[in-house]
Amino acid sequence: MFQPRYAAYLNLIEPWWKVLRSLALKGRRFERPWEQVCEAVREATAYWNKHRHPFTWGKRRRHKPRHKPGIAAMPKVA
């Protein structure tokens, strides 16, 4: 199947790589890059497996608070 280079969202592994990068590499600097990156990925994978939950594609991240309705939002009627 042809996949254009500019459409990474079509590749379903890309969101998973994004999560792995944020768990293992975000904000870190490595003195011995290869060994420390491998260890960071192992630790992130162990954390991910320990705190496993179904991966829902396109789901909003849990740690982002939902926007509160503004004055233009209609009130919920029970």
Image: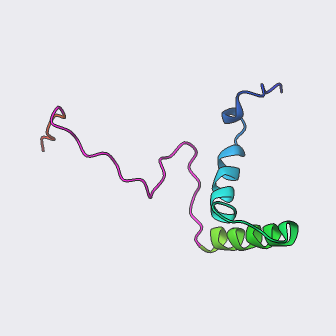
Q: Is residue 77 magenta?
A: no
x, y percent for residue 75: 14, 39
Give left or right: position of 35 versus 69: right
Q: Which residues are magenta?
A: 51-72
Query: What coloring was used for the rendering?
Result: rainbow
Residue at 19 percent across and 34 percent down: it is 73
- Check the picture and name the quadrant holding the N terminus: top right
Give left or right: position of 77 versus 5: left
Residue at 68 percent across and 65 percent down: it is 28
x, y percent for residue 69: 23, 41
Give left or right: position of 1 versus 68: right
Residue at 68 percent across and 57 percent down: it is 21
Q: Is residue 30 above or below residue 67?
A: below
- Check the picture and name the quadrant holding the C terminus: top left
Residue at 82 percent across and 68 percent down: it is 38
Chief secondary structure of the magenta portion: loop
Q: Is residue 70 magenta?
A: yes
- Asked where in the image residue 58 lies, by quadrant, the reply is top right
Q: Is residue 21 above or below residue 58?
A: below
- Asked where in the image residue 10 lies, by quadrant, the reply is top right
x, y percent for residue 2: 83, 25
x, y percent for residue 36: 80, 72
